[in-house]
Amino acid sequence: MTSLADRIPTLNEGDLKALRANAARLVEHGSPVQITTASDIIPLIDARLAEIAATPKPVVVRKRAAPKKKLPPATGHQTALPDKTA
């Protein structure tokens, strides 16, 4: 089983932020073992988040949707409402 510190490089930004919030909570209200482990891992998380923030984000180019085809207006029975007597 891999340790949490070994898994940090594989986590995405959202997971790292959640992990950092949990570690900060454990530093405040955890058992002595949890406090020690969380205190050790917070600098690693912060370093990885800084590394992610320093990398340039890829530019996303959105394609325009194809223009919709113009349809002829509906005529005849297509526009008629159902008869209330039927």
Image (cartoon, grey):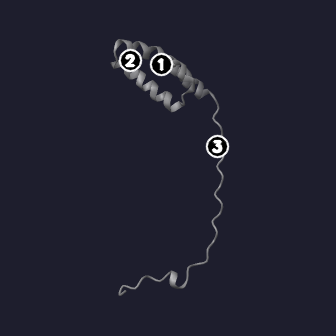
Q: Earlier in the sequence, mark 3 or mark 1?
A: 1
Instruction: Categorize mark 1 by other alpha carbons within 10 Å: few (<14), some (14-19), many (20+).
Output: many
Q: Secondary structure at mark 2?
A: helix
Above or below for 33 versus 23: above
Q: Amino acid at mark 1?
A: Ile
Q: Determine which quarter of the picture holds residue 86.
A: bottom left
Residue projecting furthest to the bottom = 85
Of 8 and 69, nearer the camera is: 8
Q: At 66% across and 60% down in the image, what residue appears?
A: 66
Image spot of residue 85 (x, y percent): 35, 87
* Disc 2 and disc 1 in contact, CB within 8 angstroms: yes
Q: Please name the residue that numbered disc 3 is placed on.
A: 60
Residue 68 position in % (x across, y down): 63, 65
Q: Secondary structure at mark 3?
A: loop
Disc 2 from disc 1: Cα separation: 10 Å
Against 62, residue 26 (above or below) is above
Q: Secondary structure at mark 1?
A: helix
Near mark 2 (Cα within 10 A), the count class, few <14, some 14-19 or many ≥20, is some
Amino acid at the residue labelled 3:
Val
Left-right relation of 9 to 19: right
Q: Which residue is mark 1?
A: 42
Front in this rendered view, residue 83 or 29? 83
Q: Position of residue 33 (x, y in %)?
A: 38, 12
- For badge 2, the amino acid type reads Val
Between the residue at mark 3 and the residue at mark 1, the CA separation in whole angstroms equals 32 Å
Please name the residue that numbered disc 2 is placed on: 27
- Which is nearer the N-term, disc 2 or disc 1? 2
Residue drawn at 51 percent across, 84 percent down: 77
Query: Disc 2, disc 3: CB below 8 Å?
Result: no
